[in-house]
Amino acid sequence: MKRVVFTGGGTGGHVYPALAVAQALLADGSWKGLYIGTRGRAEERILRGLQESGQLDLPFQSAPAVGFPGLRSPRLPLFIAKLILGVAQASLHLLRFRPQVVVATGGYAAAPTVFAAALLRKLRLLRCGILIHEQNASAGLMNRMAGRVADLVALTFPESAGHLPGCRTHTVGYPVRAGLEQLPDRVEACRELGLDPARPVLFVFGGSQGARAINRALYHILPQLLRKGIQVLHGTGMSAGTAWDATAEHAEQLGRLFREVPDWAELAPLYHARPYFDRIQLAYGAADLVCCRAGAGAIFELLAMGRPALLIPKMGLPGDHQTANARSAERAGAAELLLEEPLVEGHGIEAGVRPERLLEALLALLEDKERREGLSRGARSGFHADARERLGRLASVLAIGTLPTLDGAGQVPAGATLERLGTEQLLQRLPRLTDPHDVRYVEYRCLAALCSPSWLERNAGIKLAGRLGLQDALPLLVRLAEDKGRPGLLPRLMGERHRQNGFIRRNLCTALAELPLTADSARVLGAALKDPYWEARVEAIRSLGVLKAEATEAVVRHMARFRLKGNFEEAQAVAWWWAACMPAASWREWILPLARHANCRVREAAIRALDLRVHGGELPLADLKGELDSFLLTSTHFRPRFPLKQAMRDLAGQKAEETC
């Protein structure tokens, strides 16, 4: 009898693919299986439920594991210790069970078992194949690392191959659980769920743990949906952590609806909520429309069932994999996409969905049957019905010690690589983007970067917001500019007094110049004139001029000080600000004192500022003739200009731009 170890977990999205393959392999009695995961996590709870119901006989053993916290995290030593302990414990399980193949489906819970199997193979203590399945379009950290020691990485999306350089990959699709390939009868499904089949049904859920952002938006729009006769089936989630307790919040929101909505007693019978749907196929069968997260498991269950869906990927996940999944489904015509956005909530910023946007998107689909039928057709055409069996065959081949013969690795389709780029790389790619869907995705990435814990990512997001001229980013830019929080210990030791460092404050001023002037941006730029970092002050002066902001008494007072006592870049910027914001008749007061400034670049800026006003018809040249001789025209950085060489430099620069 052949032996197989399954591993993967942390969330249901990493567990269900392993269980689907287990169902296919263990069905004929020629395999014996073992599941190794983390105690107390989704894999143990789900497996226990299947064992108790008699659906699957698969023993469970545990190996400790925690998610990777990042190289700079204070929790890094704990992660390393847990990983070493987990590898040791998984090694004992493997040596006792002695499998011919290990099937891993990702998540941090899979790391100890995969690395233990690779180590035991290296020490010649165990002979087994290692097969990894990557569910997401953007490969996770564990699979990117483990793929290097695996015999094969099976892919759900072809574009995942681009995330796994040096790994042997093959596209097989997503292994959907048995019982989810065929849509149940709608009338029967509605009857079992207590729904009226004559009314439309909206099914909303966020995975096994729930989705706080989706839940909160839904609670706000529930009365509007229910008043239209729409039945709402809601999977609230089982999350019970300190950060968010789904059950407690659900009870609180129901209480609010009872208090604040006068006709809630009449509407309530149309709302059906439960923490988790064990028989989710019934919910799919009853639903006219599904609204959910964009985990690979949910997407491929929807494809298998042919259900039209509105996908809301979670913002800020590693590799932005949910958004990559959702964009792939959208390109295939199998779903529509609603992106989260950072929302300013009290003293913080949280990713969320604006209730009015969610309501608009849901009603547009629920009221358009033809549009939903088109999504259903796209969903059915994108489903690999044999993915579970194909993975089982690959595991069988690896179990006998040979590598499978493949018909080619997954290829990365054109235009599907934006998710792999960092925010700085998106800045470089931006001029070449023409697809509106790609531009929308870059805008989404910009907003996500603005609330990143990494200052480098926030800095790149600020620059991207300016390049895009993204007005939706303005509240976040203002929030960052007015952040009065204390910096970390290391920045304080280096003399930094602000949580947002000088580079961020400078680039905030630059980005604001690319957006329409508002009272908030004028206030931020005015405050930046007192910034301790001189580059931030210079950019604030320049931006006030670009935006032609009102020259208030406070601004004029600062500009006068910079003109007389500031550094040369401040004085230079003031000259340009005067050209944009001050009366032309004030040139003697503002510009003439710069005529003999020690720095030639300040004098040049002063002359060019006068030139702008003269050519703009605001200042007669005759008024200047008596004063122009007072300008000192010597320059310490005079360079002769050779037209032939300059032409060659211009040509070389143009050629370099075309090849970028």
Image (cartoon, rainbow, N blue to C red):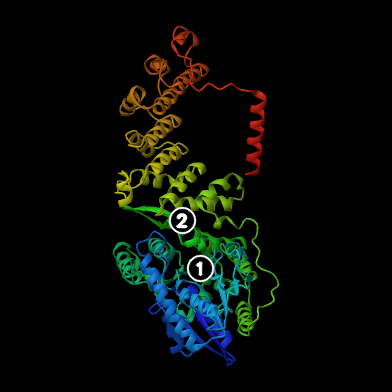
Q: Residue 250 lies in what quarter of the image?
A: bottom left
Q: Residue 293: x percent and y percent?
A: 48, 66
Badge 2 is on which residue? 357
Q: Residue 45: x percent and y percent?
A: 41, 81
Q: Residue 308 lies in what quarter of the image?
A: bottom right
Say which of 124 and 345 sits in front.
Answer: 124
Amino acid type assigned to the residue bearing label 1 in the image: Gly
Q: Tell which tag, 1 or 2, sits nearer the viewer.
A: 1
Q: Is residue 460 left or right of residue 256?
A: right
As helix, strand or loop, the secondary structure at mark 1 comes to loop
Q: Residue 395: x percent and y percent?
A: 60, 81
Badge 1 is on which residue? 295
Quadrant of image for the N terminus: bottom right
Quadrant of image for the C terminus: top right
Q: How many marks?
A: 2
Q: Is residue 178 visible?
A: no
Query: Residue furthest toward the top?
Result: 626
As helix, strand or loop, the secondary structure at mark 2 comes to helix
Amino acid type assigned to the residue bearing label 2 in the image: Arg
- The CA span between labels 1 and 2 is 21 Å
Question: Which disc, if any, is residue 327?
Answer: none
Q: Residue 306: x percent and y percent?
A: 59, 72
Say which of 655 and 84 sits in front.
Answer: 84
Q: Measuring 45% from the left and 67% from the top, which residue is drawn there?
A: 229
Say which of 65 and 438 sits in front.
Answer: 65
Q: Crowdedness of circle 1 by 10 Å Cα count: few (<14), some, many (20+)? A: many
Say which of 395 and 210 sits in front.
Answer: 395
- N-terminal of the pair, mark 1 or mark 2, is 1
Is residue 157 positioned above or below 640 on the image?
below
Q: Is residue 622 visible?
A: yes
Q: Is residue 83 left or right of residue 554?
A: right
